[in-house]
Amino acid sequence: MKYLHRLPPFEEKTRPDLILLDMNIPKKNGFEILKEIKNDADLKAIPVIILSTSKAAMDINRSYLLHANCFISKPGELKEYFGKIKEIMTFWLTTANLPTKPEKGFNALNNIEPAGHPVNELFS
């Protein structure tokens, strides 16, 4: 989270265009981090892909309720895992159109589309 918020020592770092988030990480679990990202006006438009060993409906549903953009169960074999990562990167960084980073001072709620348009929900 320090990196995403560009806190010391990451002040000069660029925010990622895509976040791959594992549910089982030290200190905070992935659900807590996902909630933080999606509740932060500066971060919420970054797509978050959940990678998990879980295939439990409860984990999948909770991820989407917390506004994950995708939930992918990790395959057990390393070769399959790397193949899955390649598929993710191809789709999200080549095929999908990701949100652009607004210019400083740009108010997305007032400058994208008329009120009530789904695009506004990305930045509200």
Image: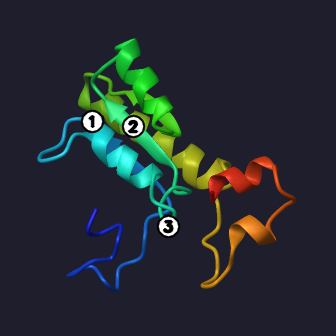
| N-terminal label among 1 and 2 | 1
Q: Residues within 10 Å of mark 2 (few under 14, many from 20)?
A: many
- Left of 60 or right of it: where is 103? right
Q: Nearer the viewer, residue 110 or 9?
A: 110
Question: What SS does tag 2 mark?
Answer: strand
Image quarter for residue 113?
bottom right
Question: What SS does tag 1 mark?
Answer: loop
Q: Which residue is mark 3?
A: 42
- Residue 50 has which mark? 2
Q: Nearer the viewer, residue 62 or 99?
A: 62
The vertical placement of 22 against 123, above or below, is above
Q: CA distance from mark 3 to mark 2?
A: 20 Å
| N-terminal label among 3 and 2 | 3
- Residue 83 has which mark? none
Q: Amino acid at mark 1?
A: Met
Question: The N terminus appears in which quarter of the rendering?
Answer: bottom left
Image quarter for residue 84?
top left
Q: Amino acid at mark 3?
A: Asp
Question: What SS does tag 3 mark?
Answer: loop
- Residue 23 has which mark? 1
Contact (Cβ within 8 Å) of mark 1 with mark 2: yes
Q: Amino acid at mark 2?
A: Ile
Spot the residue most to the left.
27
| N-terminal label among 3 and 1 | 1
Could you tell me which residue is drawn at 70 percent across and 68 percent down? 108
What is the x, y in percent for residue 66? Answer: 45, 37
What is the x, y in percent for residue 70? Answer: 50, 35
- Left of 55 or right of it: where is 64? right
Could you tell me which residue is drawn at 30 percent across and 20 percent down? 54
